[in-house]
Image (cartoon, rainbow, N blue to C red):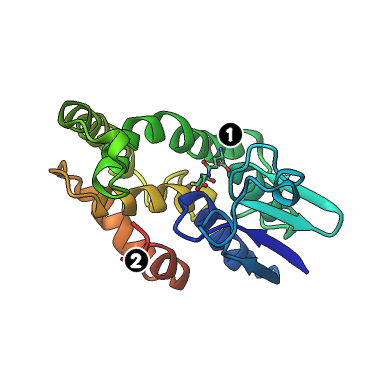
Amino acid sequence: MLKILGRPTSINVRKVLWTLDETGIDYVHEPQWATPEASTKVPEYLALNPNALVPVIIDGDFVLWESNTICRYLAAKAGRNDLLPTELRARAEVEKWMDWASTDLNNAYRDAFMALIRKDPAYDDAGRVAASAKRWNGAMGILDSLLEGRNYVAGKSFTLADIVMALSTHRWRSTPIEHAVTPAVERWMERLAQRAECAAYCAPQYP
Ligand SMILES: N[C@@H](CCC(=O)N[C@@H](CS)C(=O)NCC(=O)O)C(=O)O
C-alpha cells in the first residue's frame, strides 16, 4: 500500500494527505517523521529524500518527494482530471497557484509564521515580523481579488489549487497578526469548509 511519511503539522504533508483523501487512494501514514521521535537526518530517511524534508511518498518501488509534484502524481494516478485538468491552459492555471504558494507566498509569510506560531527565537525580530505580515496581507489581497470573480481558485470547480491555497489561508488566519479584510476569501473558505477534508486539515491544532 502507498505510504506517506511526515508530521501532519507540516502544511506540505497535509496537502498530500488531503489530496490522498480526495482521490480515495489507500495509504498508510507514518506521522513520526520530522519529529523528535524520528529524525529525517538518518541514513534510512536520507536515502529516500536527500533534502531531509517531509513529505515523502513510497508507491511500490517508486519514491517521490516535493509536495506539489506528489499531489500532481496522485491526481494523475487516480485519473482525477477534475483535480488536475489535462487541458493545457486549465492545468497551467492550477499549477500556477500551487507554485506561487510554495514560492512567493511562502517567502512572504515565513518570518511572521516562524516568530509568532513556531516561536523560533531565530525569527524574533519585530521589524522583520511586521514586514512579513504586510507582505502576507498583500498576497492574500491578490487571492481575494481573484476570488471576487470565481468560486474556486482555478475557475469554476475544485482543484489541487484550492487544497494548497486553503491550507495557506488557514495558516494566515491562525497567525496572530492584523489581517486585511478579504470578503471573497471568507466566502470561498466557507464553501470549502463543507468538505470533510478541509475541516480535518484546516483544524485548529494545525496552524
Ligand atoms: N519544497 C518542499 C518543502 C518541504 C519542507 O520544507 N518540509 C518541511 C516541513 S513543511 C520540513 O521537512 N522541515 C524539516 C523538519 O521539519 O525537520 C516540498 O514542498 O515538499
Frontmost residue, 111 versus 69: 111
* Furthest residue in direction right, as rendered: 61
Say which of marks 2 and 1 sits in front.
Answer: 2
Expressed as whole percent of the image width and height from the top left, the position of residue 120 reads 31, 42
Label 2 residue SS: loop
Frontmost residue, 130 versus 96: 130
| Residue that label 1 marks | 92
Q: Quadrant of the C terminus?
A: bottom left
Q: Where is residue 69, by image quadrant? A: top right
- Dot 2, how many residues are within 10 Å of its Cα: few (below 14), some (14-19), or many (20+)? few
Residue depicted at x 67% and y 44%: 65
Report how far apart the C-alphas of labels 2 and 1 lie in the structure: 32 Å
Direction from residue 135 to residue 48 in the image, left or right: right
- Dot 1, how many residues are within 10 Å of its Cα: few (below 14), some (14-19), or many (20+)? some
Res. 146 mark: none
| Residue that label 2 marks | 205
Amino acid of disc 2: Gln
Frontmost residue, 115 versus 18: 115
Q: Is residue 183 visible?
A: yes
Residue depicted at x 44% and y 73%: 196
Location of residue 118 with respect to 201 vertically, above or below: above
Direction from residue 12 to residue 65 in the image, left or right: right
Label 1 residue SS: helix
Expressed as whole percent of the image width and height from the top left, the position of residue 193 reads 35, 66
Q: Quadrant of the N terminus?
A: bottom right
Residue depicted at x 32% and y 51%: 171
Frontmost residue, 54 versus 167: 54
Q: Is residue 142 visible?
A: no
Residue depicted at x 16% and y 44%: 177
